[in-house]
Amino acid sequence: MTSTTTPLAIRCFDAGDTDAVVALWQEAFPEYRDTTRPQRNPHLSIANKMTTQPELFFVAELDGRLVGTVMAGYDGHRGWMYSLAVDAAQRRHGIGTRLVAHAEAALTARGCPKVNLQVLCAKDDIRGFYEALGYRADAVISMGKRLGQYADAAPAASGAPA
C-alpha cells in the first residue's frame, strides 16, 4: 500500500492542479502528447470536465504531490469512469484501487446502478487491473462519432478509439 507515514489523500480537482494533471496524463496516456489528435488535448478535457459534474473529478495526493487522477460521470442511467492515471513511480501501491473505489462510492451515492469504462484492446495489463477489481467485459461494441470541430479528425492508425 502507500506510505504509512503520510496517508494518501483523495480530493476534488482544483484549478491549481492543472499543470500536475496534464503532466501526469501525458506520461500515462501517450496519445495526450499527440498534437494531431486535438480531441485528446488534456487542457480541453479538464476544461470540459469543469463544466459537467466537476465534483466527480478526483486527484490523489501523497506527500503534497499529485500522484493520481480519476474522472467519473453519471447521466441518470449509467455511470462512466475515465482518465484513471497513477504516477509511474507510485504504481502497485494501491493508489489506482483507492481512486476507483472513491469514484465508485461517489457514483453509488448518486444512485448509479452500474459503472462503465473502456480499455484499449492492446492494454492487457490495464484490463487485468480492472478485472481484479471485479470489472468484466460486456458483450457490446463500443461505437463513436466525432462531433463539431473534431468531426474531421483522422482516426488513429491502430484503430483505437480517439
Image (tube, rainbow, N blue to C red):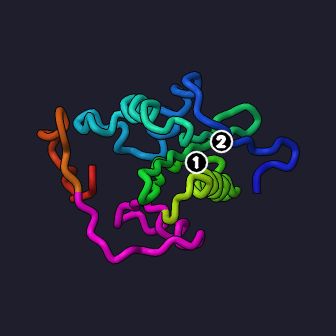
Dots 1, 2 in contact, CB < 8 A: yes
| Residue type, numbered disc 2 | Ala
For badge 1, the amino acid type reads Val
Q: How would you rate the neighbour count of disc 2 (Cα within 10 Å): few for under 14, some for 14-19, many for 20 or more?
A: many
Determine the residue located farthest toward the right in the rendered image: 5
The CA span between labels 1 and 2 is 9 Å
The secondary structure type at the circle numbered 1 is strand
Furthest toward the top, the residue is 16
Q: Is residue 142 above or below residue 68?
A: below
Residue 140 included in the magenta stretch of the image: yes
- Residue holding disc 1: 86
Describe residue 97's horizontal placement relative to residue 149 as left or right: right
Q: Position of residue 7 (x, y in %)?
A: 81, 44
**Considering the image in quadrants, where does the N terminus appear?**
bottom right
Taking the magenta stretch, the answer to whether it contains residue 18 is no
Figure check: 106 above or below 57: below
From where the camera sits, is residue 96 visible?
no
Question: Residue 120 in the image: x percent, y percent?
Answer: 36, 61
| Residue at image point 48% right, 61% down | 115
Q: Label 1: few (<14), some or many (≥20) within 10 Å?
A: many
Q: Secondary structure at mark 2?
A: strand
Judging by the rendered image, the residue that carries numbered circle 2 is 60
Which circle's residue, 1 or 2, is located before the other in the chain? 2
